[in-house]
Amino acid sequence: MKPVKVGILGLGTVGSGTFNVLKRNQKEILGRAGRRIEVAMVADRDVERAQSIVKGDCEVVADGYLLVNNPEIDIVVELIGGYTVAKDFVLKAIENGKHVVTANKALLAVHGNEIFEAAQKKKVIVAFEAAVAGGIPIIKALREGLTANRIEWIAGIINGTTNFILSGMRDKGLDFNTVLKDAQALGYAEADPTFDIEGIDAAHKATIMSAIAFGVPVQFDKAYVEGITKLESIDITYAEQLGYRIKLLGITKRMANGIELRVHPTLIPEKRLIANVEGAMNAVLVNSDAVGATLYYGKGAGSEPTASAVIADLVDIARVDTVNPEHRVPYLAFQPDAMNDTPILPITEVTTSYYLRMQVKDQPGVLADITRILADLSISIDAFLQKEPLEGETLVDIIILTHQTQEKNMNAAIEKIEQISTVMGKVTKIRLENLL
Ligand code: NDP
Ligand code: HSE
């Protein structure tokens, strides 16, 4: 069979990893794909640097349009990132009848519906294994391995940078900025680390998984997004004393009235496997009706781990290129006419448990006032911790873990608690998930 010709747009962290792994494991990959996968052209702004990576093995150009318009190229691999130029290149490649592989979760979470529609019309594949949890084959698992199941919920540590930061803060007592710099140096962080630390990158990935799990369009604009920048290390410590770890989770859940889609710091019982995922590692827990809970763990970022997923897509395409497009795996797991419009619920409608921390005056009746407010709103307390006041101080920290309630109910309780004269300042609220 004739080789499949590939063009790589962007030879940065993931692009160079893809080039190198394809070259190194050429024989192995040929044995699996049944066809040679040949990089015919690379486009990068920095031609000299790209040339130093490809070492004369293929043509290097600065202008990506030379690549997407090149009639020799069968598959365009978009590894530039972002929503602007990457979108233009992807749509042009599709218009030119080329298959596309991308690791660009931002692009798919925001413009995925338009891109999949264009691809459907041109009968080309858009593959994106690397876009969610880097090297972990979670898209394959959700779209194919779990295809018999009704998926109930997914909860994932899907941003390596924030997990690396939270681990560093907890284990080594390092401050936020020091650990962030380490993550950037290791190539985990996005070009703009705001996307990582504010939860946006995780929300891009959760949005894609939500669409695949529940057969709805990608709807990043409806996701609730809260990062780790406001998280205080005292809460990591208190959570630990209560038997919990705090992780930035991407959660999507099927509920009776809609779909929850949210990213936020979350307390998880420390005995759960996922609570022990440390450093830049990712893990995704999927709960489905037939198989029950399954857990996928591995490197969610980095040059070669991400290249592993990009190349898996290339091999898939090399194998099914000639298959009738109607018989391919649908982009979002469900056939276009089987998609549904179940609404994404606003955060106020979400149901979960909570960790509350407040500082109160150490005097009689304070606790009674707080618990009365919770009881009046039918919020049940699961655990309680009162810290000793420091020498000479009259204020104490109180930590309450609640059972499940709706977010709007919890917000109403917090508003009332903050009005009690013996409660000082704001109440810190962190969501808690028992995950099974
Ligand atoms: P990099 O910034 O390392 O690489 C992007 C490359 O594209 C750079 O070499 C950049 O050049 C080049 N580039 C930018 N604009 C153009 C253009 N107009 N034409 C040609 N080349 C261009 O990014 P990553 O490799 O880290 O990420 C690539 C994609 O993979 C992103 O979508 C990212 O979200 C995703 N991803 C990344 C992971 C990771 O671990 N890094 C993991 C999973 C997904 P210059 O340096 O001059 O800007
Ligand atoms: N910045 C991302 C992370 C890269 O830290 O997980 C992988 O998508």
Image (spheres, rainbow, N blue to C red):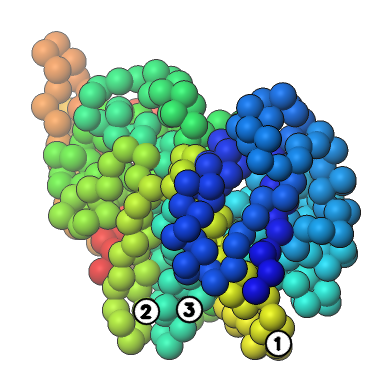
Task: Describe residue 270's horizontal placement relative to residue 81 as left or right.
Answer: left
Q: Nearer the viewer, residue 54 or 368?
A: 54
Q: What residue is shown at x 37% (from left), y 31% (from top)?
A: 165
Q: Secondary structure at mark 1?
A: loop
Check if mark 1's residue and mark 2's residue have beta carbons within 8 Å.
no
Quadrant hosting residue 359: top left
In the displayed orientation, state which residue is furthest to the top.
392
Q: Which residue corresponds to mark 2?
A: 288
Q: Which residue corresponds to mark 1?
A: 324
**Which one is in front in this view, the residue at disc 1 or the one at disc 3?**
1
Quadrant hosting residue 245: top left
Q: Say whether disc 2 or disc 3 marks the residue closer to the N-terminus.
A: 3
In 3D space, how far apart are the residues under numbered discs 2 and 3 (Cα atoms)? 13 Å
Q: Secondary structure at mark 2?
A: strand
Where is residue 178? Give x, y as percent.
Answer: 39, 18
In 3D space, how far apart are the residues under numbered discs 1 and 2 (Cα atoms)? 30 Å
Query: From the viewer's perspective, is residue 73 above or below residue 214?
Result: above
Amino acid type, callout 3: Glu
Query: From the viewer's perspective, is residue 310 above or below residue 287?
Result: above
Where is residue 104? Give x, y as percent.
Answer: 64, 50
Crowding near pointer 1: few (<14 within 10 Å), some, many (20+)?
A: few
Q: Secondary structure at mark 3?
A: helix
Q: Which residue corresponds to mark 3?
A: 144
Q: What residue is shown at x 22% (from left), y 41% (from top)?
A: 239
Q: What residue is shown at x 38% (from left), y 47% (from top)?
A: 299
Residue at mark 3: C-beta within 8 A of ligand 1? no
